[in-house]
């Protein structure tokens, strides 16, 4: 029996179609059970079970007047920011909040940089290897069987649909991880995932349909652009749910430093902090077309 590593624990906690949405609502200030239920259109039993899991996982505290994000929970703002930015860039037809950087006053996107050298970072210049707890079987989310099977856009919560398709289930997140670890051929994925061929081919087909992998199973631009969100999830997991035998992944930036992600503002290049990010409710946004 394998124990999950930091990635497996985080995905078990957050890679669920509701959990990140609950965290998002908390960040937007909706803290009471009834407010969450109204905002998410979620049944009371499901909401209650997700809230309990988030409290047990150290993301939320239960208070008399509702729920509050813990320090660990508050740190998820950067993961959500990366997911919002990715969905804004690649997924059509979603009403997502707008993020404004209060330091420079501009609407911005988060840019990924290396905390070591301060330079820009992407999946092209970060080398990833498996760490001491990196066996892929241990990066498979725990408790993922509670995810409803066959859920689709039509019956899901309707937000982050593509993100959830990519990391919201047991094999999807492992497939994505394998792609970032350099798997390219069918048998690479099969070997890394240790899953039956029909599962591997089903996942790969889904990823090709979503435009994240090309027909040759290489990451597309859309797929590579998930890297900032993946680095935030991994960094959060290693900080709050580390495995006793060490990190799951060892990442090195092109500068030679151990890679630690830092997000900077695309408009002014200053490092981003949660307090400096103002979330504006979604509207049909008029964007500069030039
Ligand atoms: Zn660097
Ligand atoms: Zn800025």
Image (tube, rainbow, N blue to C red):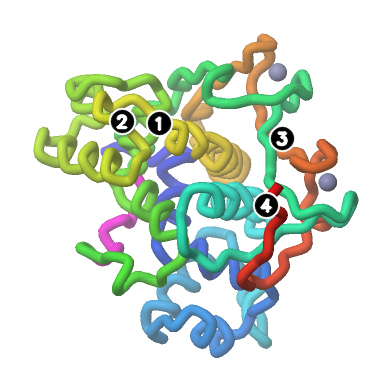
Answer left or right for 251 relative to 223.
Answer: right
Disc 1 versus disc 3: distance between alpha carbons?
Answer: 23 Å
Which dot, 3 or 4, sits closer to the camera? 4
Examine the rendered structure and indicate whether residue 80 appears above or below residue 132.
below
**Residue drawn 41% across and 81% down?**
42
Work out whether residue 138 can be spotted.
Answer: no
Q: Which residues are magenta?
A: 141-148
Looking at the rendered structure, the secondary structure element under dot 3 is strand
Disc 1 versus disc 2: distance between alpha carbons?
Answer: 6 Å
Q: Report crowding for label 2: few under 14, some 14 to 19, many 20 or more residues within 10 A (C-alpha).
A: some
Asked if the magenta segment contains residue 55, the reply would be no
Looking at the rendered structure, the secondary structure element under dot 4 is loop
Q: Residue beneath label 2, please?
A: 214
Q: Earlier in the sequence, mark 2 or mark 3?
A: 2
Q: Earlier in the sequence, mark 1 or mark 3?
A: 1
Q: Residue beneath label 1, please?
A: 220
Disc 3 versus disc 4: distance between alpha carbons?
Answer: 29 Å
Q: Earlier in the sequence, mark 3 or mark 4?
A: 3
Residue 262's disc number: 3
**Residue drawn 61% across and 71% down?**
284
């Amino acid at each position: 029996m394998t124990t999950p590593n930091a990635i497996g624990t985080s995905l078990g906690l957050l890679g669920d179609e509701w959990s990140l949405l609950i965290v998002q609502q908390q960040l937007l200030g909706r803290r009471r059970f009834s407010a969450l239920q109204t905002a998410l259109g979620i049944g009371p039993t499901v909401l209650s079970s997700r809230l309990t899991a988030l409290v047990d996982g150290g993301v939320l505290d239960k208070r008399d007047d509702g729920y509050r994000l813990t320090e660990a929970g508050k740190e998820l703002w950067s993961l959500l920011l990366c997911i919002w930015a990715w969905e804004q860039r690649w997924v059509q037809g979603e009403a997502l909040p707008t993020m404004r950087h209060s330091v420079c006053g501009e609407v911005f996107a988060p840019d990924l940089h290396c905390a070591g050298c301060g330079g820009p970072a992407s999946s092209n210049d970060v080398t990833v290897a498996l760490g001491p707890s990196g066996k892929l079987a241990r990066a498979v989310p725990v408790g993922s069987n509670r995810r409803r099977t066959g859920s689709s856009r039509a019956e899901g919560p309707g937000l982050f649909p593509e993100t959830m398709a990519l990391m919201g289930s047991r094999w999807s997140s492992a497939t994505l991880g394998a792609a970032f670890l350099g798997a390219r051929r069918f048998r690479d994925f099969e070997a890394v995932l240790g899953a039956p061929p029909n599962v591997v081919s089903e996942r790969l087909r889904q990823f090709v349909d979503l435009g994240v992998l090309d027909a040759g199973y290489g990451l597309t631009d859309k797929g590579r652009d998930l890297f900032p969100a993946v680095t935030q999830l991994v960094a959060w997991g290693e900080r709050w749910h580390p495995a006793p035998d060490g990190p799951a992944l060892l990442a090195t930036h092109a500068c030679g430093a151990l890679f630690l992600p830092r997000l900077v503002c695309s408009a002014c290049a200053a490092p981003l902090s949660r307090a400096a990010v103002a979330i504006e409710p979604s509207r049909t946004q008029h964007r500069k077309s030039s």
